[in-house]
């Protein structure tokens, strides 16, 4: 089990609840969220995302120059776990090819839905997005 905090820390616990350790993500930025899929744990802050190594109690940050606005949400494409999808505060949704976890390769920008941020949730080969911060939110499916 893992928990993240505003100090940029990630705390890991064993299955039985015993404390394994705590470490900070590179840059020590507040961790906005965690996402896990098929043995991969992804963290994201306002400006970066990266991978967590629970056994080694460490995190590897990935720098992507295409991220021009704070990150609202990030996740792994369930049909291709080397693809990371990132939603930005300005409404953009970007996809990156992360076959080599140290190299952020921009793959695509989804068509703009508006200027409101979108919360991402991968589901059965698609990624669902719901606008946040609007009185009448829309739900979208990205493929």
Image (cartoon, grey):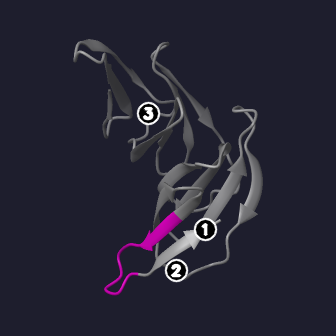
Q: Which residue is mark 2?
A: 115
- Quarter occupied by the C terminus: bottom right
Q: Main secondary structure of the magenta part?
A: loop
What residue did someone put label 3 on? 28
On screen, residue 86 above or below 60: below
Question: How many callouts does the rendering have?
Answer: 3
58 with respect to 22 (left or right): right
Q: Which residues are magenta?
A: 128-137
Q: Position of residue 123 (x, y in %)?
A: 50, 57
Q: Which mark is residue 96?
A: none
Q: Is there a contact, CB below 8 Å, between mark 3 and mark 2?
A: no
Disc ID at residue 142: 1
Sequence-wise, which precedes: disc 3 or disc 2?
Answer: 3
**Picture quadrant of residue 91:** bottom right
Q: Is residue 136 above or below residue 98?
A: below
Please identify the residue farthest to the front as the structure is shown.
124
Q: Is residue 65 above or below residue 8?
A: below
Q: Earlier in the sequence, mark 3 or mark 1?
A: 3
Residue at 73 percent of width and 43 percent of height: 104
- Residue 91 at least partly seen: no
Residue 67, percent from left and from top: 63, 56
Tell me if mark 1 has few (under 14), some (14-19) or many (20+) residues whose alpha carbon lies within 10 angstroms of its own. Answer: some
Mark 3 or mark 1, whichever is nearer to me: 1
Between the residue at mark 3 and the residue at mark 1, the CA separation in whole angstroms equals 31 Å
> Mark 3 against mark 2, which lies toward the viewer?
2
Q: Mark 3: give few (<14), some (14-19) or many (20+) Cα within 10 Å.
A: few
Which element type, helix, strand or loop, lies under badge 1? strand
* Whole-number angstrom distance, CA of label 1 to CA of label 2: 17 Å
């Amino acid at each position: 089990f893992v928990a993240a905090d505003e100090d940029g820390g990630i705390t890991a616990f064993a299955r039985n609840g015993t404390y394994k350790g705590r470490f900070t993500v590179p840059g020590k930025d507040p961790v906005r969220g965690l996402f896990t899929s098929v043995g991969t744990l992804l963290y994201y802050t306002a400006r970066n995302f990266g991978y967590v190594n629970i056994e080694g109690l460490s995190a590897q940050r990935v720098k992507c120059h295409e991220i021009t606005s704070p990150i609202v949400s990030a996740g792994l494409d369930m049909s291709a776990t080397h693809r990371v999808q990132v939603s930005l505060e300005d409404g953009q949704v970007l996809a990156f090819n992360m076959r080599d976890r140290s190299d952020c390769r921009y793959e695509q920008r989804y068509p703009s839905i508006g200027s409101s941020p979108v919360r991402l949730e991968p589901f059965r080969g698609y990624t669902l997005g719901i606008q946040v911060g609007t009185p009448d939110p829309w739900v979208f499916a990205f493929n």
